[in-house]
Image: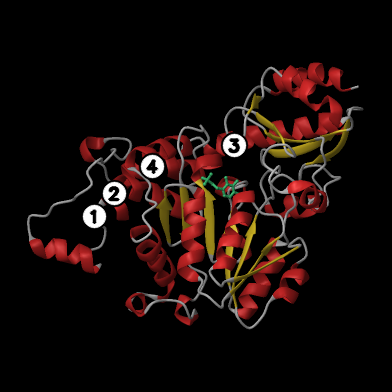
Amino acid sequence: MDKQGFTTGIVHGDRIAGTEHGALRQSVHTSVQYGFERVEDLIGVFQGTKKGGFNYARQGTPTTAALERKLTSLEEGVGTVCFSTGMAAITATFLTLLRAGDHLVSSRYVFGNTNSLFGTLRALGIEVTTVDACNADDVKNAIRPNTRMVFVETIANPGTQIPDLQGIGEVCRERGIAYVVDNTITSPALFKPKAVGASLVINSLTKTIAGHGAALGGAVTDTGLFDWSAYPNIADDYRRSAAKEQGLLQIRKKGLRDMGASLSSEQAHSISMGAETLALRMKQSSDNALALAQFLEGHQAIGKVFYPGLKSHPQYEVAQALFKGASWLLSFELLNADRMIEVVNALQLPVKATGLGDTRTLIIPVAPTIFFEAGPQTRKAMGISDGMLRLSAGIEDIDDLIADFAQALKLAA
Ligand SMILES: *Cc1c(COP(=O)(O)O)cnc(C)c1O
């Protein structure tokens, strides 16, 4: 069949790739070991000469492999490795492709735990520089002879800054630097980082892709654009494979097999089920976030609203040019921060919880929770005020959400 549409591919992919008994989805394979009639086949799986075989579930199962195929197709890549969490995918990528003495350039505005991980990398002798990635020149100026990788996210949390994704892609291509893009907030339904030259794409499957908040998972997809044969940190063992496969092969062996943060078949299945409605959810939650952002921007109790779908957003044009929607992440400031607790408690629908990309709207005050450890100085530098609230818009009916905010914000005056 010709190349199919996004959702068609997800809902028919397992069946077309082949399942037992005509099952519509890949089964949940719970076996840790995989046995063979002929020992030659066992040897072939170990040596990588027998493609598509399994030996021990830490390196993957037919169920995780089915999810990897789906993600590869959604990101239009050449392969994917799944992990137990998004952080495991990011950690494995850094630790298998960077060495002591290497330099990583990243955005100043990245997911808090990723930023904390940079501290671990520094302690291991990997230099990390963070810059304002909204300007590709800042990234370019930070590059040194030992820079091996640039890492950015598509939309930053909670400030919603968008890096100059295209410009950074050009800088990386010119210099032969690996370009890693965390696509968690946008997901392949809104944006494919391959379009801006990304080498590797990270997705926290926990968020947008599963959507139900009932499973943790992460993935690294290779877009096939990067020439790993010229990358200095690939081990000799993996040089024998095709140039395009070397990076991901090293991540699977050194990152998944050796480090062991493996995704279980049960979780992979749960994530696959959620992914079937990815495009529908992204449309609805992006529409809801935009309507809420517009409502909040016009409300007298609200200061700044941070949402890339608003014309007032500094990267509005970038979002329009690159993304099919501005996603579910939206932050805003109560002018009167003293009223925050009352206002949030008065909301009936949004769940007072951390987490992102759920079918339900989630809300959290930023300063006293996810950025509490950062301290007042860092918060100030990052533009996080005491009255800032972060919202992950769900797929509820928009009239219900707006009515709920309208009644709760009466307490903000
Ligand atoms: C949540 C998140 C992660 C980490 O994902 P987990 O599955 O929770 O480990 C990484 N990057 C971004 C942008 C995230 O929002």
Q: Nearer the viewer, mark 3 or mark 4?
A: 3
Query: Is 247 located above or below residue 213 in the figure?
Result: below
User: What is the three-letter code of the residue carrying label 2?
Assistant: Thr
| Category of crowding for the residue at label 2, using alpha-carbon neighbours closer than 10 angstroms: few (below 14), some (14–19), many (at least 20) | many
Is 195 situated left or right of 46 in this image? right
Secondary-structure class at tag 3 = loop
CA gap between label 1 and label 4 equals 16 Å
Image quarter (top left, top right, bottom left or bottom right) of the C terminus: top right
Which residue is pictured at 76% across the width and 62% down the height? 132
Residue where numbered disc 2 is placed: 61
Residue found 34% across the figure and 37% down from its top: 266
Considering only order in the chain, which callout, 2 or 4, is on the residue closer to the N terminus? 2
Specify whether 270 is left or right of 211: left
Q: Which residue is mark 3?
A: 355
**Which one is earlier in the sequence, the residue at label 1 or at label 2?**
1
- Under mark 3, the amino acid is Gly
Residue 371 horizontal side relative to residue 192, left or right: right
Q: Is residue 109 left or right of residue 271?
A: right
Residue 184, relative to residue 223: is it above or below? above
Q: Residue under circle 1?
A: 54
Of the two numbered discs 3 and 2 in the rendering, the one whose residue sits closer to the viewer: 3
